[in-house]
Image: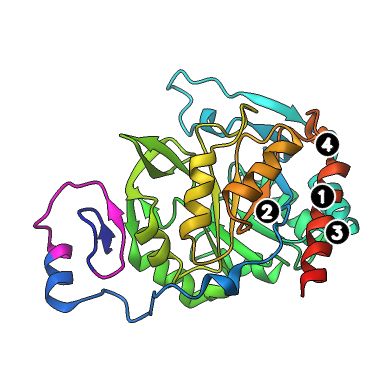
Amino acid sequence: MTTCSAHLYSNGGISCFHKNHSSPLNNHLKLSGPLFPIKTKRPSRVLVTSAVQFRPCIDIHKGKVKQIVGSTLSDSKEDGSVLVTNFESDKSAEEYAKMYKEDGLTGGHVIMLGADPLSQAAALGALHAYPGGLQVGGGISSENCLSYIEEGASHVIVTSYVFNNGKLDLERLKDLVKIVGKQRLILDLSCRKKDGRYAIVTDRWQKFSDVLLDEKSLEFLGGFADEFLVHGVDVEGKKLGIDEELVALLGNYSPIPVTYAGGVTVMDDVERIKEAGKGRVDVTVGSALDIFGGNLPYKDVVAWHHQQQESSSALH
């Protein structure tokens, strides 16, 4: 297992919390250059700039479509934490998938908040209802990633599997790329503030990794994925407004398409994402939407989405 745990790679690599400047990995990099033969030079950002899109979501917990404050999820039943559920739907994941298909929304994500059989079955139902229109995440590994593609997912989304025990596991990342291809892989780089910097969090957003989200890490990881999905965990599910600083960081430095989630409450927040992200950051909305028990009309967000597409087409 090869992990990133120590320093700022000098060849366009990863920013990490400083721990051990003389680690074997550091010495390897100093002696032999970049660990990967893949070129990670940032492509022209004009190539990935297009109309801002609304990316729909289907979060599944124990087989039900729910909106949960993600930071309250925990693998342990003995840690004293209380799961905060904003909404539980009486509609199935399949019904939401059909609605997104009818509304012409692509690139949405289905997230299994647990690897139980009911959640897996619900996720497959959504994928079958909208083949090629949805991405899937939650418990994705080298062993099962290809099966979800075969079931109709356009991409698989991974976080904890490639940030193993709080460190970037380069071998696992390369293995995933080898199996499904860069063009079908999405890296979830959801993050929280720590010591004034954004650090990627894993394991149901409970564990800080040692990888910082910044220009170098985005450039490096962009060489292995088709898109990024980034939840602003400090505001996610709380309907307190967006993390504008994080959106700006993504708009400035992501070399590939990126979707931001967290804190959207009103349409003005969607516009703020468009502005702060310089038209390069897509948006997903969960708890605030009326289809998930919130006050923001889903139809208004869909109308905004199509307006962005039409405006982009007119310019071209």
Region rendered in magenta:
11-26
Residue under label 1: 304
Residue 199 figure quarter: top left
Residue under label 4: 291
Answer with mark 4 or mark 3, whichever residue precedes in sequence: 3
Quadrant of the image for the N terminus? bottom left
x and y, in percent, of residue 262 in the image = 60, 38
Asked if residue 287 can be seen in this view, the reply is: yes
Q: Residue at x 84, y 63 (%)?
A: 310
Question: Distance between the Cα atoms at labels 3 and 1?
Answer: 16 Å
Residue under label 3: 101
Tell me whether the residue at label 4 lies in contact with that at label 2, contact meaning CB atoms closer than 8 angstroms: no
What is the secondary structure assignment of the residue under circle 2? strand
Answer with mark 3 or mark 1, whichever residue precedes in sequence: 3
Tell me whether the residue at label 1 lies in contact with that at label 4, contact meaning CB atoms closer than 8 angstroms: no
Q: Residue at x 34, y 36 (%)?
A: 196
Q: Amino acid at mark 3?
A: Lys
281, 25: nearer the viewer = 281
Q: Residue at x 63, y 49 (%)?
A: 275
Answer with mark 1 or mark 4, whichever residue precedes in sequence: 4
What is the secondary structure assignment of the residue under circle 4? helix
Q: How many neighbours does mark 3 have within 10 angstroms: few (below 14), some (14-19), or many (20 or more)?
A: some
Tell me whether the residue at label 3 lies in contact with that at label 1, contact meaning CB atoms closer than 8 angstroms: no
Answer with mark 1 or mark 2, whichever residue precedes in sequence: 2
Question: Distance between the Cα atoms at labels 1 and 2?
Answer: 19 Å
What is the secondary structure assignment of the residue under circle 3? helix
Residue farthest to the left, as pictured: 22
| Residue 315 falls left or right of residue 224 | right
| Magenta span contains residue 135 | no
Question: Distance between the Cα atoms at labels 1 and 4?
Answer: 16 Å
Question: Distance between the Cα atoms at labels 3 and 2?
Answer: 13 Å
